[in-house]
Amino acid sequence: MARNDRRTLGSTARGDVEEAFRAARDNGRIRIARLRPMGCRGRQVGWSTLLLAVLFTTGRPATAQSAPAQRVTDCLVTLERRVELSAQHAGMLTLLQVEVGDQVEQDQLLGLIDERAAKQQEAVAAAELEAAESEAQNELRVQAAVKTAELAAQELKIMEQIRESNPGAISPLEISKQQLKMEHARLEVLVARRAVALAVITMKAKEAQHRLASLEVQDRRLTAPFRGLVTSVRRKQGEWVSQGEPMLRIISIDRLLIEGYVDAALHSPREIANSRVQADVLLTRGKRHKTPCTIRFVSPEIEPNNSFRVVVEIDNSERKFFPGMSADLLFWTSEAEAELDGN
């Protein structure tokens, strides 16, 4: 009879301990996750010890590492990089060497719009530039003008020496004519130097025209702006394309974005911007995969529904995720710091 009473009392005490344990665990005040079964004698000691642990820890505030993460649901996986390549000039599509599903590298040539006229214009501009460079580097006119000015000055000096020794040998009018000739030669030097300066300016203008002609040729070439996948081809080789007409679509899934909205009543944009974050992505057949991510953007604007937009970036080099998938975002703020779970 006494043994039965002890069993009843033990069951009641164990129930009370379990209830206290669950309450403390739900409040985040203890970190015990599992109870190990023990022998009968050890069980009495274990329940007593556990009761003391519960009574001791329930009066303590929760630590940062025991606080749960803030979960933001209904987030969407989106593309980070996508582009619609359009024709920058009208013309015939003379080359198209990609198809839907092709993997392309950055700066790879994908297509070509008729560039024959543009190449001819580039050749003309190159020839004009070469002539302008030759003229700008030509110092012969300056050198000739300098020599003429030096000769005129030397002749004037000789005439003045003769007139000093023999005043009647050279008339003042001849001296004046020689002085005028010397001044004219000096002005010719200035004119020659000015011509060289203008030739340099003309050369720079021809350089700009040549660069413009080269751009006209490059604009007729369709190149991949980044490494990615061709998902749409709207024209075929030999067809006419109009300026601004979309031709190819390229996407990159090496890195993806996840967009979601955080309840502003729970967290501020500044708090989220300084938090740790993890993505919990919903895969096929109900499977989920957790992966670390980096905060890319936190909107400082609160929407009318009292939420703000958050964009994070995830690595997708293993091609586990695809645009359009659903995901949850887990945030650990400074008030609720925790270690990120494994995959």
Image (cartoon, rainbow, N blue to C red):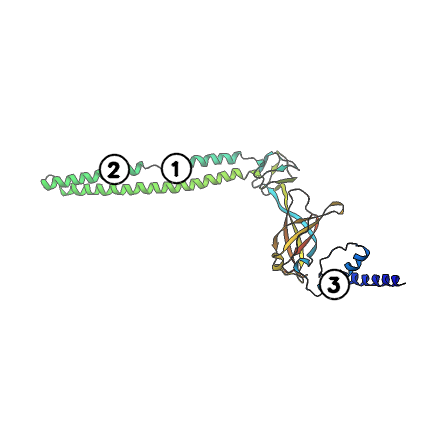
Tell me: 112 left or right of 53.
left
Give the camera-side residue of 74 and 67.
Answer: 67
The amino acid sitting under disc 1 is Glu
- The mark nearer the N terminus, 3 or 2, is 3
- Residue 113 percent coordinates (x, y): 57, 36
Q: Nearer the viewer, mark 3 or mark 2?
A: 3
Residue 69 sits in quarter = bottom right
Callout 2: SS: helix
Callout 1: SS: helix
Q: CA distance from mark 3 to mark 1?
A: 94 Å
Please name the residue that numbered disc 3 is placed on.
Answer: 52
Please name the residue that numbered disc 2 is placed on.
Answer: 147
Please name the residue that numbered disc 1 is placed on.
Answer: 133
Q: Is residue 123 visible?
A: yes
Q: Nearer the viewer, mark 3 or mark 1?
A: 3
Residue placed at 15% from the left, 39% from the top? 159
- Residue 40 percent coordinates (x, y): 82, 56
The amino acid sitting under disc 2 is Lys
